[in-house]
Image (cartoon, helix red, strand yellow):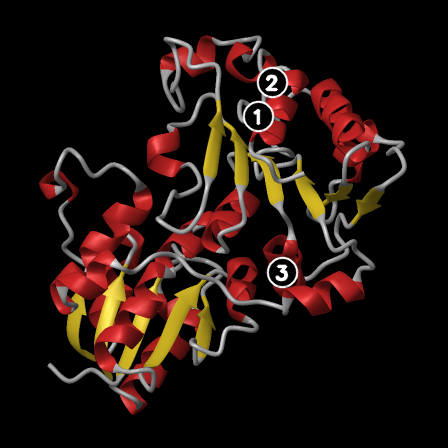
Amino acid sequence: MSIKSVLIIRCGALGDLVYATSVIEALRQEYGEGINIDFVSTPGSASLFKDDSRVRKVFHLKHKKIPIFFSKDKKNIINYSKENEYDLLINFESGKQFKSLLLAINAKKKIGEHFNTKSIPSHITHVVEITKLIFKEIVSKEVFDSSFPKLFGTDKEKAKKRYDLDDKYIIISPSNSHQKKNRLNYRAWENRSWIELIELLSRDIQVVIVGNKNEDEFFNKLKPYPKNVVDLVAKTPLSDLIGVIDGAVGLIATDTGTAHIASALNTEVFALIGPTPANVTGPYQSPFNRVHIISLGLECSPCYKTEVMKKCKDNICMSGISSSKVYETIVSANIL
């Protein structure tokens, strides 16, 4: 089958889009570097491809549930495909709200729209590996086995110079996407523990703090920072953040997008995991990176989106992780 143009649909959170990047190198290896790869993604996550020359075009889809008739974004995607028929459409979305869009897009071959999760072998658990199964039929086994998430952003040396970073530094990403929701953030680590860890690490190495805009209320609780700490919260566009993470010796975070970015860049990851299943949605362990899952391993974990989690009031699986345990794990990795 000759494939020269592909449209890929992945409209989840940032981590979901990072997972899906494993298909990019697979397509390029199988069908040549000249293949045209376009993506349909949410506006925020789409900036992941700003400096990625492998992706030709990104269509923004802000509102996924709005019918085609009322959606300019969906009409734009459909009209483009009518004028420029795709050889292949790969759908990584399972929601019914994408059905009409999938039917309307003009492509010679479409895969993923009828993907059956019940057919997934029991030994395959991680979202990256499940995602890869969707395009397994169109690439060779060799290409399939060697395809992993991979990102491109600002060159790491340029990023270091731009933000006046040391040659050697470690990143702390203390927030996550559930930070501003009006309920207990089950993925969060205690503020006092972050403060203790920042203090401990800043004695050994330059510490860089990263986070999103409009999170002042959270980050102000961690201040004042000690010396040898660089505050880059809300100061880096996503392409620069990729470069900053690429240049770091390691990144510490909870289950959040920056941890997935780090694993795709082969930057060492220290992920504090409690209620979520690390073997399913945690930062992905490939043959080229090192991922340290720091967890208490309680009998009630993982409990994400279960009655156990709803009834939990003290979030012990996260609050019980000590700053000394995290610090010792980092020290034992010999990266400082």
Task: Between residue 144 and residue 82, name the one nearer to us.
Answer: 144
Instruction: Work out whether residue 192 can be spotted.
Output: yes
Q: In the rendered structure, are the residues bearing label 1 and label 2 in contact, judged by CB atoms less than 8 Å apart?
A: yes
Q: Which mark is residue 329?
A: 1
Q: Does 253 appear above or below 214?
A: above
Which quadrant would residue 108 be assigned to in this image?
A: bottom left
- Type of amino acid under label 3: Leu
> Which mark sits nearer the N-terminus, 3 or 1?
3
Q: Is residue 78 above or below residue 287?
A: below
Q: Residue at x 80, y 60 (%)?
A: 163
Along the viewing direction, whichever of 281 and 68 lies nearer the viewer = 281
Provide the residue designation for mark 2: 325
The residue that mark 3 highlights is 238
* Residue 74, visible in the rendered structure: no
Circles 2 and 3, Cβ within 8 Å, touching? The answer is no
**Disc 3 from disc 1: Cα separation:** 28 Å
